[in-house]
Amino acid sequence: MAMSQRSRGRLPPDANRILFVRYHFSHVSSRNLPFKISAEETYDLFGKYGAIRQIRVGTDKETRGTAFVVYEDIYDAKNACDHLSGFNVLGRYLIVLYFNPNKMSKKMSAEKKKEELEALKQKFGLGTVGNVAQ
């Protein structure tokens, strides 16, 4: 017998079918999913909670240690998020969040602005030793 959508529980306001996954050491705050984990292993782990439409595991320098998991059903995504947040995989702990494109773009914008500021500081010699304008 299938559960009705209402009997599955209330969803958080930011819930959606896309999960952003980040792995990190418990004692170091880093964004490092075990680099040797494959999309298949990620599928095995997250597939226990429902049908998956797509998995994207980060492969380049900026995205290594992260993955996106897209579920067919929002309630399956919620179940995975609830059960896998804090789960230990290969000595690293999972951080599982609902993907929020607005937060991601704001974060990327802030990081880009910071990089541009650092480039300008270097270009004009600001913030260097012996310079008053640190």
Image (cartoon, rainbow, N blue to C red):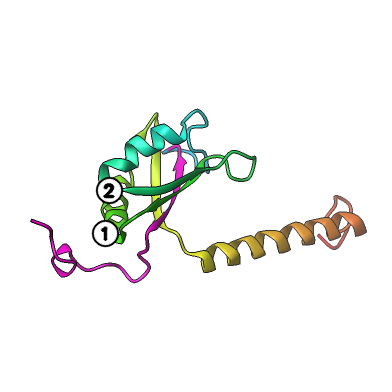
Residue 87 in which image quadrant = top left
Q: Name the residue under label 2.
A: 50
Q: Residue at x 89, y 52 (%)?
A: 130
Left or right: 22 as drawn, with respect to 75: right
Principal SS element in the magenta part?
Answer: loop
Cα–Cα gap, marks 2 and 1: 9 Å
Single out the residue that lies furthest toward the front.
Answer: 1
Q: Residue at x 13, y 61 (%)?
A: 3
| Local crowd size for mark 1, using a 10 Å CA cut-off: few (<14), some (14–19), many (≥20) | many
Q: Name the residue under label 1.
A: 75
Label 1 is placed on what type of residue?
A: Tyr
Label 2 is placed on what type of residue?
A: Gly
Q: Position of residue 38 (x, y in %)?
A: 47, 32
Q: Give the range drawn in magenta.
A: 1-25
Q: Position of residue 117 (x, y in %)?
A: 78, 62
Indicate whether residue 104 is drawn in magenta. Answer: no
Of residue 124 and residue 85, the one placed in the foreground of this image is: 85
Of residue 80 and residue 106, the one placed in the foreground of this image is: 80
